[in-house]
Amino acid sequence: MQIGRRSLLLLAVCILGLVGLRIAEPKPLRQLQNLGFDLMQGMAPHGDVPSSFTVVNIGERSLDNIGPWPWRRDALATLVDRLHDLGAVAVVLPLLLDTPDRFSAHALLERLAGEMPPADHAELAERLAHLPDPDEALASALARLPTALGTAVRIGAAGPPEPGPAFGIPSRTAIPPEVPRFEALTVATPGLHAAARAEGAVNLVPEEDMVLRRAALFFLVGDVMHPSLAVAGLVAGGREVAFARHPDGGYAMLVDGAARRTSAPGIVWLDFGRRTKIPVLEAQSLDADAMDRIHGRIVVLGLDVAGIGRPLRLADGSLASEPEIIAMMGDALDIGSVLSRPLMVQAIETVALAVGMAVIGVVWLATAPGLASLVTLALGIGWVAVVAVARMQAGLVVDLACPLVLSTMLATVSAGLRTARLWQIRRELVTELQSRTRAAEAANEAKTRFLHEMHHDLRTPLNAVLGLSGLLKGSGLARLSPQQITEFATTIHDAGAQVLHLSEQALQAAEYATEHATPNLQIVDLGEALVKAGSIMLGNRQRTASLDLHIDPAPHFILADPTQLLEAVLNLLDNAFKHAEGTETVILASEPLGNGRIAIDILDEGPGIDESILEHVGTPFPSERAAHDGVRGAGLGLFIAQRFAKTHGGHLRLGKRPGGGWRCRLELDLVGDPKTADSRP
């Protein structure tokens, strides 16, 4: 189906609008984008690589054995030492230990200082002095096993102590302004802070639908790039970490020199498909059988107790504790299965979306709906394949849902435009069919009137022939005088000639109407042809009006069929005589026009043709004139003359004479005198 300009313009406007909507990313489109990301969970690079992380949860069994949370920190130190004995390379503590242990002797004495006499307080202090300090015990354990302690970035006044250079990560490029910036940092107590190998922020912020899909790898606090706890865990585990530009553009986190591409600076998308690769143990069950899941791994030690902490909803729909999420982030960074969505990918998406929608729109407008549906489906499947390959092979997050939904919307709009176009074509066809039907009905009616007029024109002379021949055939011939017999014979002859003339007119009109009239072109002396036509008309004794010839005496030659020229002029003269009164004069004249043409004029003093029916003169059966002026006839004369003019490159012009009456002017092209042409050297 041919595509109209209006449909193409509307299609272009729709494509631009949808692309603009995609760039603006309103909330519904962001939700669609997140849905597409969630559906692709489990598709990330290096999915089968073993994990270097293990999660050890302090769960209900541990609390039943040791006591409710919070524990004394010497109990936590015992757990850290157990991990050291089982061969852990580092431990990550997603706990904020920013205040001293409240169960220590020092904390107990501070709480009782105002509640007992000074002497009793001093005696109690002396008796508790030999007790070990839980914070010191934990610090000693942290010094034996490389540890990453939890911190919290915050907005507000700075709190002691600020992180030093040891707990920042180096940057090998200028720090971009998009890096999240915070004013202060909450860190562990000085003793624990000094004993730890690294520190990292535990801040995890879900999306607006409360699902965790992205996470920051570092935060800018002052001039220090402070890592997240997952990155700090890698540092504690002996990995070399730095922030740098990615070789392909954008930014990356370097882990032992391997670039992990990030989206916005320091932001990565998380795929939790490797969750089953990370062992999860209960702290109370750390026996020798657990060594194979602890030895050589980085252990994330945290709480998994109902009512303490809040689990986060992941993109795959499941819930996970904070230690599990930190372990999954560290695992993804370590093996390179993090996902990113750089600006380059978003730009390519937009271009691909525009091109795809253009193809879909044109196909829906130009082809059958079945083929258009197949093309749309093929493009959709191809886009899903591209998204999967980009995610699994290159770790790129390509939007899955938005292009599919927007392309479907465009296909729907294009189908609507196609339907509207089809209805428009249908209306045009119906209108054309109605017009042709009316024309056919009019032609049929005209033919009916033509047959009626021909019947009248033929009946009159035929009645004369039959009546007079009947008188001559019987015994009545003897009663007729020779003069009467001669008059009867003349009348019969004239009636037969009239019937023959009408028959020839009808045949010639049929030839012109079917475009089968092929002229036998010859060089004709126009003056001689006009004189001959005038002589034929003057020889017709039925004519009561007179005929004057005003033929230009100079020789004029035209290229025409002599027979058709004579018929055309005779028909115009016959038409003029029909509408002339008995005392009027018909003029046949020729006049050179000076532009290589000559005019043949037939002038009469009759009423002429009503201007309202002039447009029907060129039709095969223009009998409307008879209804106008009461003169009966088949109406073929003007039609034959008009078609003669058309086949000979001339014009037939009809109009009123300035002084009254009617003029028919036939204009034809002149040619040179053949005798003069033949005599040239």
Image (cartoon, rainbow, N blue to C red):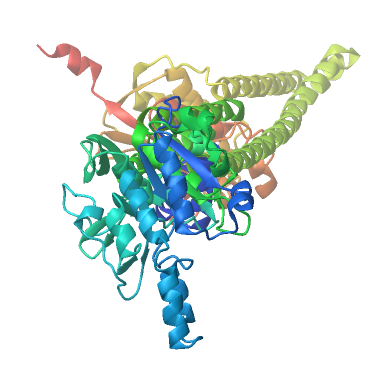
Query: Relative to the observer, which residue lies in front, 549 or 96?
Result: 96
Which image quarter: residue 223?
bottom left
Query: Relative to the observer, which residue lies in front, 18 or 363?
Result: 18
User: What is the x, y in percent for residue 596?
Assistant: 26, 33
Determine the residue positioned at 43% across, 53% down. 94
- The reply, left or right, for residue 253 in relation to residue 650 is left
User: What is the x, y in percent for residue 387?
Assistant: 44, 33
Query: Relative to the observer, which residue lies in front, 575 or 611?
Result: 611
Q: Which quadrant would the C terminus be assigned to in this image? A: top left
- The reply, left or right, for residue 127 in relation to residue 248 is right
Q: Which residue lies furthest to the left in this view?
A: 681
Determine the residue positioned at 19% across, 49% down. 170
Q: Is residue 666 visible?
A: no
User: What is the x, y in percent for residue 180?
Assistant: 32, 60
- The reply, left or right, for residue 447 in relation to residue 104 is right
Which image quarter: residue 653?
top left
Determine the residue positioned at 73% across, 35% down. 445
Which image quarter: residue 636?
top right
Q: Is residue 107 visible?
A: yes
Q: Please count the marks in the image.
A: 0
User: What is the x, y in percent for residue 379?
Assistant: 49, 29
Query: Relative to the observer, which residue lies in front, 583 or 24?
Result: 24
- The reply, left or right, for residue 628 in relation to residue 283 is right
